[in-house]
Image (spheres, grey):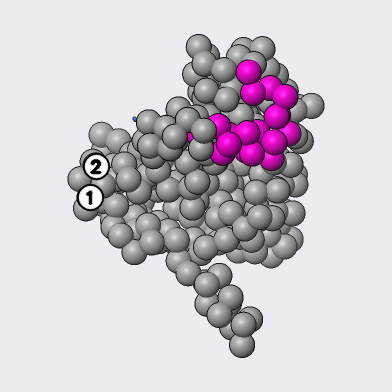
Amino acid sequence: MAGKGEFIMENETMIEVNKLQKDFGGNAVLKDITEDVKKGEVICVIGPSGAGKSTFLRCLNLLEQPTGGQVMFKGTDLTTLDEKHVNELREKMGMVFQSFNLFPNMTVIENLKLAPVKVKHLSDDEATKVAKDLLDKVGLAEKADAYPTSLSGGQQQRVAIARALAMNPEVMLFDEPTSALDPEMVGEVLKVMQDLANDGMTMVVVTHEMGFAKSVADKIWFMADGYIQESAQPDEFFNNPKTDRAKDFLEKVL
Ligand code: ADP
Ligand code: MG
């Protein structure tokens, strides 16, 4: 019976996207997207450049205002909220970009403490503890007092992930987090993301790392031409893509 309770919890919907559309001055980038993300799920969004992947991710936390449709986060339609309430919900969705965007004039630990102190009003001691735990988790405890520019790209991206986690988000959104890294640093960042997935974090990851998508994703969303053309488990998607668009894409990247 305990198993049944867990099963229900695992199926709780975190994000629900309904008929999402986004135009930029008449250019229809997202045409009609309806999907959902369950608690604890790892979704990898893949597809060609210009498909609308970044726009889609940015619509999930309303960094972009959708032109049509709904984005529900735990049952609340974000598109109907005022800025203050959007900000409150946005705190529950951590985001990590291709460019790490760390504050260069602050040490690593100051980067991690800033939002928890300013936005969540944690005490300095509390924020320090959270930050140290997270730096430990991403393998950078000894870099707490370093400045971002003294770190490698892989280390900076791990700090950026830790900084997003410092707000204790319920969902993590990643937009090509390893695309700007030298090849030898990709693995250390993917490892941190894999650990996070193993811990049960709900994640939506735009990535070109097909190995990661195959081994870590619960589901692949293949996006092209403003639609999610295929939504399938990795085995199914990679071994038996249904659309010509996906077959063509996989031929090029695999
Ligand atoms: P992807 O991340 O899949 O490469 P994007 O979401 O970045 O795709 O872009 C999809 C399309 O939307 C592109 O044609 C891009 O030029 C357009 N686009 C993205 N952001 C903007 C913007 N702020 N203003 C105008 N057009 C945009
Ligand atoms: Mg993009």
The tag on residue 84 is: 2
Quick check: can you spot residue 161? Answer: no
With respect to residue 134, does 46 lie above or below? Answer: below
With respect to residue 188, does 110 lie above or below? Answer: above
Neighbours of disc 1 within 10 Å: few (<14), some (14-19), many (20+): few
Identify the residue under disc 1: 81
Q: Amino acid at mark 2?
A: Lys
Q: Position of residue 224 (x, y in %)?
A: 50, 47
Q: Position of residue 50 (x, y in %)?
A: 48, 36
Q: Give SS at disc 1.
A: loop
Residue 133 on the magenta segment: yes
Residue displayed at 63% across by 81% down: 3
Residue displayed at 37% across by 57% down: 73
Residue displayed at 50% across by 11% down: 105
> How many tags in the picture?
2
Question: In terms of secondary structure, what is the magenta stretch mainly?
Answer: helix
Quick check: can you spot residue 249? Answer: yes
Quadrant of the frame with the N terminus: bottom right
Residue displayed at 44% across by 34% down: 123
Q: Give SS at disc 2.
A: helix
Quadrant of the frame with the C terminus: top right
Q: Is residue 152 left or right of residue 49?
A: right
User: Which residues make up the magenta segment?
Assistant: 127-145
| Nearest the eye: 229 or 167 | 167
Q: Amino acid at mark 1?
A: Leu
The tag on residue 228 is: none
Residue 186 on the magenta segment: no
Q: Is residue 208 left or right of residue 239?
A: left
Neighbours of disc 2 within 10 Å: few (<14), some (14-19), many (20+): few
Q: Position of residue 125 (x, y in %)?
A: 52, 33
